[in-house]
Image (spheres, rainbow, N blue to C red):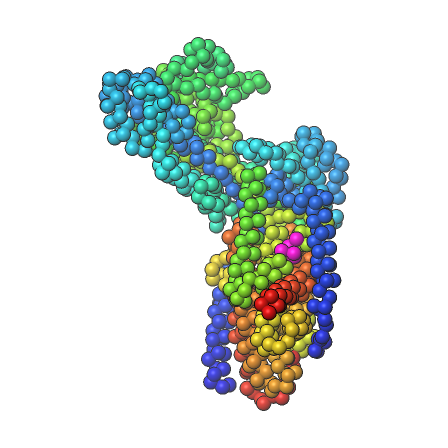
Amino acid sequence: MQLLKDVNVDWIGRKRQWLSLSLLLIAASLATLYMKGGPRYGIDFRGGTLVYVKFKDSPDLGRIRAALSEQGLSGSTIQRYDVPEKNEVIIGLGQREGEVGPDTDAGRVRILEGLQSAFGSSSGQEGKIDLNNAAPDELEDRLSGVAGFTSLLESDESPAFKTPGELARAVTDYRDRNGGIIGAFQELESVEGMSPRLLAAVQEQAYLGGFAVFQTEFVGPKVGRNLQRQAINATLYALLGMLVYIAFRFKGTAYGAAAVVAVFHDVLITLGFFSLADRELSIPVVAALLTLVGYSMNDTIVVFDRIRENLRLRRRESISSIINRSINQTLSRTLLTSGSTFLTALSLYYFGGQVINGFAFCLVIGVAVGTYSSIGVASQLLVIWYDFQTRRRTVARAARA
Amino acid sequence: MPRKLRWRFFTILAVVLACVVGIIGLPGSTDSLLQNLSDRIRLGLDLRGGMHLILQVNTEDALTIETDQSVERIKRSFRDQEISFGEIRRRDATHIEVLEVDPDRLVDVRAVIDEGYPAWQRGNRSGSSDSFLLSLRPEVEGQIRQSAVQEAIQRIRNRVDELGVTEPVIQNHGPATEYQILVQLPGVDDSVRVREIIKSTALLELKIVEPQDVYPSRAAALEQYNGVIPDGRELLQGIPQFRDTSEPTQAWYIANRSAAITGRDLRMARPQNDQFGRPAVGFSLTNDGATRFGRVTSENIGKRLAIVLDGRVQSAPVIQGRITDSGEITGSFTSQEANDLALVLRSGALPASMDYLEERTVGASLGVDSIRQGIMASLIGLVGVALFMVTYYRLSGFIAINALLLNLVILLAAMVYISATLTLPGIAGVVLLIGMAVDSNVLIFERIKEEMWAGKTVVSSVGTGFSKAILTIVDANVTTVVAVLFLFLFGTGPVKGFAVVLFWGLLANLFTAIFVSRFIFEFILSRRRRVSLSI
């Protein structure tokens, strides 16, 4: 395909429009960040407790709230997680300063107690083990304690499990591979080697609680503050490192400065979109931002490389025309690379799952903005700098004359 | 094949073989292939489930213990030299006050302290010539703090090993002056129990109770001494006892401050049942410990012996006779608690208490989901990019796809060879890399196209295209590598995994784009004199 042969778009002529668009986007980003009181920090930076719970049936948030209030946790946040069909909920507790100590786990324990009393066992299940929350070892211990269980395993028509431990592991593996929660005992019939007799024996020892915890996070305030500082440092040092490299490779600070300003612009606008979408900043998101810094820089350098080459080849041409030509020459590459990167970022956003959704969102926005900024910001700034230089030289010459 | 190309072909072949063998070994069947694959690629906690903990070691505790011991030793030295003193006490974790020594023997006092206690810097207490303030030298303080962390790491490792966790990570975390420990336990999901086991200081002390009385409250005990516990003794609280009624009975004891036996003297500890069949922990002592225990018990027959665990009296049985090498800790334990107590006693006491700064647990089901979704996103991304490339570059697109696949193979092999951990952000890195990795090929192809449009022959277009693109490729990749390096330094766990993937992916990218793609082009061109190229 030769879609972009001999394109000749006048990018530099629309300098004002590009820069106004960027300024507008930056202003909008700052405005939304300002209105929401800065970026929304996730638990990594803010500290606190998060408990991710999956329910057997569609959870009634009101009932969860009531159960938590009973534990004195009326200040907790309750949010649905992922798609509604998964019945997943995140329960969050803020971290109060100075609360660090041996009992930092208290919040989580209370959340679990509240859930247990509202969604855990019902009557007739006392003394049994909760199959939806049991670790393999717990189940193994339980089954091993049943008199005659091993002989039951041996006398099975086609003995599939040699020890109670093997059976326990088969059951918990099945649970973990199928969403982490078992809705009814009949489901366990599809465990390989499970016979109706064994299932009945398991059923005598266990019940199916209404919820299962699949992830917990606790971050103390001290760690949060440290991470916040580290994240900012890492980003700034990365920018500095690139500035130095570009200044070295392009023998001049103008290129480095223009590229860094463009990247800074990308980060700011991505943060703006983040704030607009009400998403939280987490460590993976910062990682995505840093990747973005690298990606956007990469994109800018490809254009700059061409500018440098053309400056050598076409000494008589005006700088605007050279930069314009360089952008056009690399345009097809820019669109292809950004296109394929954007494609994979989208794939990550739509299919990568909830855990890295924020990360993927950051990349989708970032790749788009980063591609734009190479042309719309970095190159334009370079033109402005060269124009300024020329004007100064002309003025100087005029003064001498 | 021309000679020039032949050695390149063999180099590429060797690299590919080394990578493939690295990833899947030499499997005999499809099953063992998959088995090898999953054995060799180490999954992070976020993918296989488990616990991630960051602990703060309260190194002040270790200093306090050291300072307390020094106070006792200095007192003894003074008594040995018959130097009278008003008081010697710990002011804080790193300072000792020596008050009102015999003014006539200041020279001896200085000599005793300076020669016998080089870890302490002697200074005068302002306004008095007969009192001193000793400060622990900063370098000694640093050593004590560091060794407390190292010892804690060792103890935690013992405990984790006893729990049977495979491939645990237990190491220093962050700057050395923060005294933090990172613990990662793959596959552990009984988090409540595990965190208790890791954190319990498990400081066992056996102390003689003097006087014999058991007091119902703190106030009752203090009343006995008009509110001041005599020197060398301390007030200890017992664990609440449940007898007959549901109301717990409180018990307070006054015992010797110095312990007859500590956890260090234990040779073995195991769960057992006491005479009433309740869960208890039996222990046996080392030879040295047994000798001392024998002496202490024979001297104190009829007195109570307090069994103190982390500062709380578990039980205080009356010594019936001389005991030498073994004993039993009874209290109100469940059998699980007795098990865990035996475990932590065996592994040794922690030199300092610890707080949890960060704790994350990931259930196995979440990891399974994440892997499934990660693979899904990779495949869709891969197919999308492949279609994109073939549509745009036609046959040359296949060269790019080939480079891309090879890139992934090299990346995986590198991960196996350096035993890096694959995390969820790492998988995201792979997906992203699929998109970014075509960049080098795109740069090259575009250059070749330009040269062809300019009217050059196919052969010379390919040659110039490559050599012109290389500089840009290197420049562009270096900046990304800079970002990745800082990411590696900044990140913990999952994010490090991402940085590692991107780093090796970019390196592999340079190799496949500059070396492999070029080889394929030149190979195709060497076969026939071509006048056109499908690009």
Residue B503 visible somewhere in the drawing: no
Type of secondary structure dominating the magenta stretch: helix
Q: Is residue B264 left or right of residue A324?
A: left
Q: Which residues are magenta?
A: A264-268
Expressed as whole percent of the image width and height from the top left, the position of residue A78 reads 71, 39
Q: Does residue A266 belong to the magenta stretch?
A: yes
> Which residue is depicted at the point 75% across and 39% down?
A61
Expressed as whole percent of the image width and height from the top left, the position of residue A137 reads 55, 43
Q: Nearer the viewer, residue A127 or B388?
A: B388
Q: Judge whether B456 appears above or below B93 on screen.
A: below
Expressed as whole percent of the image width and height from the top left, the position of residue B369 reads 64, 53
User: For residue B242, which quarter of the picture?
Assistant: top right
> Which residue is depicted at the point 70% across and 60% down?
A19
Expressed as whole percent of the image width and height from the top left, the position of residue A225 reads 57, 41
Total labels: the figure holds 0
Q: Nearer the viewer, residue A30 or A177?
A: A30
Q: Is residue A252 left or right of residue A364?
A: left
User: For residue A212, which quarter of the picture?
Assistant: top right
User: For residue A63, which quarter of the picture?
Assistant: top right
> Which residue is depicted at the point 64% across and 71% down?
A319
Residue B137 visible somewhere in the drawing: yes
- Quadrant containing the C terminus of chain A in the rendered view: bottom right
Q: Nearer the viewer, residue B190 or B221?
A: B221
Q: Does residue B24 belong to the magenta stretch?
A: no
> Which residue is depicted at the point 55% across and 86% down?
B526
Q: Judge whether B76 appears above or below B185 on screen.
A: above
Which residue is the extreme one toward the front?
A401
Which residue is the extreme one toward the bottom?
B529
- Quadrant containing the N terminus of chain A in the rendered view: bottom right
